[in-house]
Each structure stands twice: as C-alpha cells, then as structure tokens.
Image: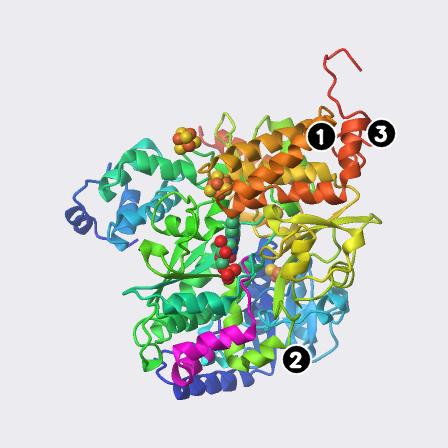
Amino acid sequence: MIDRKITQQISSAEDLAKVAAEQLEWQAQYQHRVFVCMGTACQSVQSGAVLAALQTEIKNKGRENECLVSPGGCQGNCASAPLVSVPEQDLLYQTVQPADVEEIVDALAGKPVSRLLCDNKGDFFSKQNRVVTNHRGLLNPESIEDYIAAGGFRALLKALAEFSPDNVVQELQKSGLRGRGGAGYPTGLKWSTVAKARAEQKYVICNADEGDPGAFMNRSVLEDYPFRVLEGMAIAAYAVGASKGYVYVRAEYPLAVERVTKAIRSAEKHGLLGNKIGSMSLDFHVEIRLGAGAFVCGEETALISSIEGGKGLPCPRPPYPAESGLWGMPTLINNVETFANVVPIITNGAEWYATIGTPRSKGTKTFALSGRIINTGLVEVPLGTSLRQMIFDIGGGVPDGHKFKAVQTGGPAGGCIPEEHLDATIDYETLMELGSFMGSGGMIVMDDSSCMVDVAKFFMQFCAAESCGKCVPCRVGTAHMHDMLDRITKGEGTMEELGQLESLCDVVKFTSLCGLGQGAPNPVLSTLRFFKSEYLAHIVEHTCPAGVCAPIGQDIRRPTCALSP
Amino acid sequence: MSVKTRAIRKIDAVKVPSDDKRWLIVAAAMRKHGSAQSALIETLHSVQSSFGYLDDIALAFVAHSLRIPLSKVYGVATFYSHFRLKPQGKHNCVICMGTACYIKGSVKLLQKVDQKYGLKVGNTTSDNQFSLLEARCLGACGIAPAGIFDGRVLGNLSPALVESQLDSWLKESTANETKSPS
Ligand SMILES: Cc1cc2nc3c(=O)[nH]c(=O)nc-3n(C[C@H](O)[C@H](O)[C@H](O)COP(=O)(O)O)c2cc1C
Ligand code: SF4
Ligand code: SF4
Ligand code: FES
Ligand code: FES
C-alpha cells in the first residue's frame, strides 16, 4: 500500500501544523484520488479485493505518480456496497467488482462509468448534516497523517494551550451537548461533576458496547474516526483531571477493535497520547477492553464491573460513577459519539454547535436506518428533524409496495411509533412523550408484514435473555411477560391477562434496579398504546392481521390434537 | 507470538497444563496485565481465541494463575454469552437475530438450517462439521439479514444462500475424506 508515514514526535501546535501541511502537500501531488470503503459492510462484499485491484491497475498503467488509492470510511448507504468514491469528480460508484476497476481508472478525469454510478446528490445524502461523520468516508481511517492533515488533534492541542480545564467544561456546557448513549444527560454537567471530585486517580471510559440490536452508528464512528474518539477522550481527560482511559468495545466488532488498537499505538508513538501530550502537562494512557456478549454491560455500572474483571452486574446508583466508578474512583463515562462530538465543539466553538438542533436537543445525531426501508444505512441529521423526513426523504420509504406501519427507536427499551406521529421531531423529549426513547440511534422501520405483538414478544425475549438476574422484577417479570405475550400470539391469551400484562409492565418499569428492567416494558406499552387492535385481534378473533403468527385469515391457535383440523 | 518459553515458565509460578504452545499465548496475555485479577475476562478471551472454547482444564489454569476462586471464573465464563464451554465444529455459522435481521426474516434462515440439517442454535452437527450460533446484532444491519461464516460477515442472506454456504462446507469435507485414505 502506498502510504506516507511520519516518524516525528509532535510536541506543539506548530509541529502539528507542519505535519498537516506536509501531508497535504504530499496528497496534492496526486492529481487523482480514489477512496474504497473499507467499512464492515463493504468488506463483507470484498471491497478489499477492489482496493487491491485498483492499486494493481494503476501500477500496471504506470500511473502511480498521479493516482492515489486509499482505504476510506463508510459512505452511509452500505446496502450498495462495495462503494468507491472519486472526490474530485464528486462521484460515487456502487456495487463495484474487481473486474470494474479498469473502467474506473480509465474514467478518472474522463467520462464517468455510468452503469456503476450511485446517485450521491439525492435526498439520502443532501438532507443530512454531517458533523461527527463530516469526512463522508473520504479519510483513511488508519492513517494518523491523514487525520492530522484533515485538522486532527488541533482541538486537543488548542484545549491544552488555550483553555483551562474549567474552560473546557464550560465550553461543553455552553454547547448543550447531551449524552449520545441513550438517556441524554447533559455532557458538560457530567464533566463538571467528575472535575469537582477530589481523588488521586480518575478515569475516562468510552462506552462502545453498542448492544442495541439494529444499531451500528458507534461501530461506524469507531471504524472511521478512531483518532477523533481518542482525541475527544483526551480532551475529556484534561477537563476532568484523569490520566487513564478505557475504550470498552464489544467483541462482535473486530474491525473497530483493530482500528482503535492501532490508533492508540500510533497516537502514542507521536506523542499525542501517553505522557506529556504535546509536551504539555497532560498524561493520558488509553487501553482497550473487550466486551464478551452481555447486553447489560452497556449499562455504566455493569460496564465498570466488567472492566474490573467480574460479571457485568449493575449496582444501584447513587453513587454515580462520576463520584465512585472504576476501582471506586471518580469516573467519566460517555458514549463513542459523545466523545466524537467534543472535537468539533472545541474546534468551532460552543456557539456554533448550539445553532444546530432544537432548543433542548442540540447538535446532530447519527442513526442506523434499517428494516423495511429502501435506503438502509448510516445517516446523520440535526436533532429536530422529523421522523417523516428521516424515513421518507432520506430513507426513501418502504419498498415493494408495502405500507409503513411503525418505526422502532431506542432498542429494547424503546417503542414503536405509528404513522400518525411521523411528523414528530427526533429529539430526546418528543420521543420520550411518544413512549419511545432516543437510545443510541437505531431506527428500524416496519411495514404491514410485521405483527406488533410478535415484535413486542421479540424484544421481551431479548430482555429476558439478557436480564442479568440480579433483581427480581426484571429477572422474573421479563420471563413472565414473555410468557404472556407468547400465549397471546398463540391465541391463548384472555382479556383478563392483557390487564395483568399491563400492570406487570408497571411493576417492572418502576421497581427494577437498572435501565434494562426499567425499559423492558416499553415495547409492550408502546405497542399497546398504538396498536391495541392487533392485540385484540389475537385475543378475541384469534387471528394475526399481519400474517406472522399464522397465515392471514387462519386461526392462530395450535390444533390441540394432531387429528383436529 | 515471539515469547520465549523458558522466560514465561520462570515468571509464572503456575505451570501451564501441557506443552501446547497455545498456553504460552494465554500466559502472555495474563502477564501483559500483570496477572491482576481484573485480567480475568481478557485472559478468557485469549483462551477462547487460541483454543476455540474454554474447557475445565483452561478454567482451572486461569483460576489458579490469577488466584481467583474457580467458582468465580466459572461464573464469569458462563455469564458472558461470548464464551463457549463446549468444543465447536470445524466450521462456524452465526446468524444474526437482532431486530433489523429479525424484521427482514432471519427466523427463516434458522428454520432452513433446522429443516435441512436438523441443527438448532447452540449445537454442532454430530460429525462436528459445523456449529450454529445466533448473534444479537453484528452491526451490519444495513445489509440485513446478516451472518458470519467462519469469521466472514455476509449480508442480504436468503435461506438458499445459507444452504449453499453450508453445503459447500459439507462438500469440502467429503472431498477431504475421500482424499485422505489414498
Ligand atoms: C441496559 C443498558 C444498556 C446500555 N447500553 C449502552 C450502550 O451500548 N452504549 C452506550 O453508550 N450507553 C449505553 N447505556 C447507557 C449508559 O449506561 C450510559 O448512560 C452512557 O454510556 C453514558 O454516556 P453518555 O452520557 O455519553 O450518553 C446503556 C444503559 C442501559 C441501562
Ligand atoms: S433471595 Fe433469591 S433471588 Fe434474592 S439473592 Fe437470594 S436467592 Fe437470589
Ligand atoms: S433490571 Fe435486570 S439487568 Fe438490571 S440489575 Fe435488575 S435483573 Fe439485572
Ligand atoms: S461500510 Fe461501506 S458504505 Fe457503509
Ligand atoms: S440486527 Fe442483524 S446485524 Fe444488526
């Protein structure tokens, strides 16, 4: 691979500017640049082979001094993978095969290969506002040189040189950034609590457990912007006075693990992590920790006990990790995307950030659009965008002539929002009012082929299986609710039981120890609120209107004897 | 791994269970974390990536080396669904059962495997050819339904695609069997 590697230590803003200028100059000597997406989805359809083929082709044609092919990040529309982009022509090629590379190389500076073109001017791209994913895949995720050339680590050195730790916290508070891990706790406030805590040792943890099924934004951000997440963590460490950090990544994300591991090493090598960062007073060491397939470990106290080497069992809060977290020390724990937002906030200022979004939900949010929708993939929009814009403009609507039924947000603690509320805006409060939840950003679209009772049962099965078992309401309640839902889908439920289900939801919601149990009833409550008729169809008429529990029109009850019809 | 055998044996008071070189990787993983008790999960990860699963010998060795009660090691190993206590088949098929994949019909994929090969989630075929596992979400929801076949993520799966992948493993093994006696 043709890559420029620097060896020097970076010990000042001047050093950084020099490295950036040199890298830009090096890039500029290439007339043509081509990026091949090396994200998880694209790699699954052999984008690596396309990258290699492009490099060989360019070499064979003797054009290696004018064309530079680099690995790039996710373009967002992963369903059209593998994707190849040619930024100078503003072109995006989709479903590229190694056999296509000759045409692509020949077309550089010429007429595009029209049969491979992906419409990158359409609503899917133009209606987004990318702050966290601003490089749109046109950044080599493994190159610290390219990251620096694109302005990387400037925010960190600026914060160290021009801001006191207090100023950084204030800047975050002014920006209005709220936690992207789900609950939306004001980030600046959390930072100030940790900053105020007195202790010999403090920690910064990046929560990259992303356990919500149907959510992959954090994976994408880690894969594409590992340096930015680390930079955000280092700024946080400076602000709160921590010297040690952990990135807790789920083991299901091998590529993200690899990229973050490499990024830590290369930042250390150049003096941008480790002791005396940028020759200034900050010492910050980061280590990676792997999850091991327990959803509850996304919960902050469970995550902490997992880093300590134990079972991921949540603990009652208070004390919050900000006061007593890892090894009993004050610990700042934020989501991947929260940290990734810190860099643009410091670079462009809190005032700029606060202009994006709504009065109470500032900034942008990444979402993973999936399910029954034409354009699946990763998108980033300002908070306050309506669900309708998201699903019908950006997402392109529901395919195959089916009818939209609901969008599920917030993962297993979220809810299903029906058609009549599609004009609601995406922000923390509005989603909560609709009985759903921002969550980490999964958005799963369902059409008339999904049965909402079945969906509720699906989530309950998930929660029952993932319940850590520490507290009774969740351990017993989720299993029992799952049982009741199962009976309803088999036509064995009664109206009396439906009432019991509702009151059990209440008990579990209000008496469980952690967010898993507290949120588990939400999918049931929201489907009961908006799709009660489907429950009634199962209970009273013994039919499944969507044809999931039994073909449409057929009785969902199992025959009691093999001989009965 | 370029660790020197002798060096490790000297540092670790606990002797590795056998001459199998893979134990050296495990021992190195423990040393990297100063053999601290908090290294338990990292150590189990290294055992599983070296041996494919955690057996009793491995659990006892880890417990002993890190000075953690075996019951706790067992507790942690069984708490996390990533850790497997049974040997796995030669090949490995993971079907995602996360929300996006579920909505896009991943149940049908599992049904197909059950129908055709009589294999349910968590089990391995009787000839040890392949294991079937399910996942919560692979983060590949954009190409749902997705699965992992021997470490390779594949998207937009259909029952037929899964079948052809599994059949190719079976074919490869029968080909090997007919070859081996000659
Ligand atoms: C069951 C459960 C799972 C969670 N999973 C995640 C997760 O995968 N990623 C995450 O960032 N936060 C997750 N959270 C929220 C964390 O506990 C915590 O609030 C968050 O990491 C704080 O970061 P933020 O303020 O930046 O959002 C989860 C919470 C619960 C109750
Ligand atoms: S009372 Fe029951 S559930 Fe509670 S800790 Fe004891 S054994 Fe566990
Ligand atoms: S609510 Fe559920 S997951 Fe949370 S502590 Fe209780 S049993 Fe464990
Ligand atoms: S992974 Fe390549 S476009 Fe998303
Ligand atoms: S739900 Fe299957 S990959 Fe996310």
Residue found 32% across the figure and 55% down from its top = A328
A442 shown above or below A546: below
Left or right, A321 with reference to A71: left
Reply yes or no: does residue A179 show up in magenta: yes
User: Could you tell me residue B145's position as x and y percent?
Assistant: 65, 45
Q: Are marks 1 and 2 on the same chain?
A: yes
Query: Which is more N-terminal, label 2 or label 3?
Result: 2
Mark 2: amino acid: Glu
A560 shown above or below A418: above
Could you tell me how far apart the alpha carbons at marks 3 and 2 are, in whole angstroms? 56 Å
- Badge 2: few (under 14), some or many (20 or more) residues near its Cα, within 10 Å? few
Marked residue chain, label 3: A
Residues drawn in magenta: A155-181
Left or right, A454 with reference to A259: right
Determine which of the numbered discs, if any, sits on residue A224 in the image.
none
Residue found 59% across the figure and 25% down from its top = B118
Is disc 3 placed on a helix, strand or loop? loop
Q: Are marks 3 and 1 on the same chain?
A: yes
Query: Which is more N-terminal, label 1 or label 3?
Result: 1
CB of mark 1 near ligand 5 (< 8 Å): no
The residue to which callout 3 is attached is: A553
Left or right, A132 with reference to A109: left
Q: Are marks 3 and 2 on the same chain?
A: yes
